[in-house]
Amino acid sequence: MRRRVFHLGVVSLLVSLTALVRAGDVPKSADFPLIKRYEGSTIVRYQQKAYDQYQLIVGPLVGRGSDARFPKVLKLEGRVTRITYLVPPGRSPLEVFRNYEQDLKKAGFTTLFSGAHEALGQGPDDTPFPETRYADLELPGDGNPLLSAVASTSDQFLAAKLARPEGDVHIALYSVAIGTDWGKYVSANPPDKKKTAVDGQVLVQLDVVEAKPMETNMVTVSAGEMASGIAATGSVALYGILFDTRSAVVKPESMPTLDEVSKLLKAQPTLRLLVVGHTDNVGTFEFNMDLSQRRAASVVQILTSKLGIDPKRLTPVGVSFASPVASNRTEDGKSKNRRVQLVENVPSPSAR
């Protein structure tokens, strides 16, 4: 799979043209602009909601049978696009998955979790993963949930994230083969059912969640959202801790966010954090290194002296503008870079 890069000004036009020229696609469907489809695939189902919730699996299944669960789930909100592709015959779920995996990496996505059959909980006594996570997955011309039609043991799942100034993009990618039960089902249910796919043909389910652009720096992240972010990626960025320009004094309106940090730490007594101060590039690197360190120390001071957190659990760190999430060439980018980040501080085995 080769990713083609277009100017942003013509992306929407190209998407519209693509929908017109791909005759096999369902009406009013289109590829997501950042992710190219596997060569020769057709869209057999397309759904989009302007704003919805989505739970993204970012860790393997734990437990078996009735005790099975996915403990690591990222709770997201934003525009949700769901695209089901039917891949040409003769391809395997792994081959298709590897192509997408490489293409996503080239596009700048970071993998949050990748798992195959067993990691998805598909043991001898477990409910199939498609039934628990993709119960509404349909085959073209069928109109009934896929469910037991999937018999593949080589199915693959990937969760990934692309950080963007205009809002992060999260994706869930599932690649699975149609099993022999599909052919038996069609044969047993004529003439209403039409076999529009062959046994072993691959289906790809691509779910995309686009976060709404941040409208203000005064954003309070809940303790639960902080916990989810740290569990998924090891860190969470906070934009609700505010300072005046060139100042390390925490502004009073920062307290709602600091209260949530306190709740997080009290709910997880063993959690240790690096409190990392980030700045934009106004001023020298050395000046901002000192400023970011003092800002991080101010945050730690409030958490320990006013909110009762053990100082041993928090380490202030300043990194100046060494780790931007957006370009410092624009005011919007600078506002994204001014933040406090909580990073899980996990000691190595030798240090315990």
Image: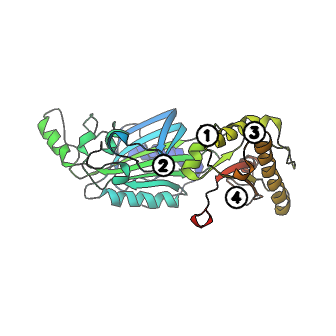
x 68%, y 41%: residue: 261
Q: Position of residue 69 (x, y in %)?
A: 41, 42
Depth-wise, is mark 1 or mark 4 nearer the camera?
1
Nearest to the observer: residue 88 or residue 120: 120
Depth-wise, is mark 3 or mark 4 nearer the camera?
3
Going by the numbered disc 4, the residue's amino acid type is: Ser
Q: Position of residue 56 (x, y in %)?
A: 48, 43
Where does the N terminus fall, quadrant-wise?
bottom left
Disc ID at residue 109: none
Between the C-alphas of marks 2 and 3, the distance is 31 Å
Q: Which residue bears the numbered disc 4?
A: 323
The reply to whether callout 2 and callout 1 are in contact (CB within 8 Å) is: no
Going by the numbered disc 2, the residue's amino acid type is: Val
Between the C-alphas of marks 4 and 2, the distance is 24 Å
Q: Which residue bears the numbered disc 3?
A: 307
Mark positioned earlier in the residue sequence (1 or 4): 1
Q: Position of residue 133 (x, y in %)?
A: 37, 40
Above or below for 336 versus 220 = below
Q: Which residue bears the numbered disc 2?
A: 58
Going by the numbered disc 1, the residue's amino acid type is: Ala
x 38%, y 57%: residue: 97
